[in-house]
Image: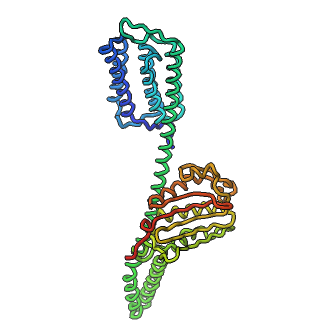
Amino acid sequence: MRGAGHGRLRMRTLVTLRWTIILGELAILLIGGMFLGLKAPYAICFGLIGAAAWINLLTGVASPGQRMIADWEATAQLGFDVAQISVLLFLTGGTANPFILMLIAPVTLAAATLPLTPLLILGGAAVGASMALAFLHLPLPLAEGVAMDLPLSFMIGAASANVAGIAVIAGSVRQAAQESARMALALDVTQTVLSREQRLSALGALAAAAAHELGTPLATIAIVAKEMAREAPTAQVKEDADLLVAQAARCREILRRLTDAPAEASDEVHERMSLLQLVHEVIEPHAGVKGVRVEAIVSGAAGAQSPDIWRMPEVLHALTSFVENAVDFATSEVLITARFDAQNVSMEVRDDGPGFAPEVLAKLGEPYVTTRPGAEGSRTGHIGMGLGFFIAKTLLERTGAVVTFQNGRPRGAVVSARWTRAKIEAPLA
């Protein structure tokens, strides 16, 4: 979350928007005066535009374009744009001027980059200016000899239409910006989780390789130390040699435990696993939870050969996350089922808890969905599962899985992932 006063609007963006507005105003006045023959107080209008251009030039020169400006500064700068556009509209017909739509631009930028309070201030200023321009304005520029008397009802209607445009466009842009920010944050967390899992996996392979390489020199040290102990000329030398033998044995025992760990003694073995190994690794951290029986089943279609699959940190982390959530909300049982046939491999996590709320089920897998019936009775008091489910779903989809969430019958939650065998299977060498 951003700290107070720390904006996410660059000075370059602000300066570019103002140049766009200024060039648009110049083009409109030049076309109206030179080609359409419209009568307006051009000297004052061009003076106002020139003042805005001078301020924008000074702003661009005095401040680096990449600088992130504070919220209060951005509010003041965009407020100046609203005021400059409003004065120009006052000089050229008020709400009868169709270019009153330009008031939407500063408010839209605020909706995309500023907190709610500055947005409401700028939006209120633009709305107030729109309504005031329906009553206070100079005549609309017209060609010589052309007269037009627009009724007040039209002016108010045009102002109301502009207010509606400000509200709808700013609201839509703000909603899209917030959703984009949430998605970016969730994806950053996903990348962090995946990076951690990959580091752990690489560490396991490195430990296994080290154990394999160190076995031979440790055996040599043990043999030489035993010879030294047998032929030691003094008791002190024999004691030192016996110590070397004991320490070498201790090192070999540590290496033996490393080679017996999930990271096997070679990369080729470590990188592949059976479905049975997969489900056992997934349920192992939760097998001892009191009051919940965690079981795993592996089944296959008749005639189909059980596949070995690649050991992917994404799959292990995601499935472990699903099992953890199922254990947290289960009444008494969690069942993990792995199925395979000639074309597909699937994993299913099912619990006998209260299941997903209907209003949440349609949004599950998006970041920050945080409600599930019975959460207050969960074993850990955990209620926020939206980001975790989003991370797990994203990780699985990166491996080519199709992930679904549904409620079981008669109760409970069901999470399943399905791959084509080509996506996940580790073929025989």
| Residue 285 % position (x, y) | 58, 68
**Residue depicted at x 45% and y 34%:** 70
Horizontal side of 351 relative to 390 (left or right) equals right
Residue 228 in percent (x, y) is at 39, 90
Position of 204 relative to 111 (above/below): below
Q: Nearer the viewer, residue 123 or 224?
A: 123
Q: How many marks can you see?
A: 0
| Residue ranking furthest to the left | 34
Q: Residue at the location (46% across, 59% down)?
A: 194
Against 189, residue 223 (above or below) is: below
Percent x, y of residue 158: 50, 20
Q: Residue 407 sits in which quadrant?
A: bottom right
Report the quarter where the C terminus lies. bottom left
Instruction: Please name whichever residue, 66 or 235, is drawn nearer the observer in this view of the structure.
Output: 66
One can see residue 401 in this view: yes
Q: Nearer the viewer, residue 161 or 84?
A: 161
Point 49% across, 16% down: residue: 133
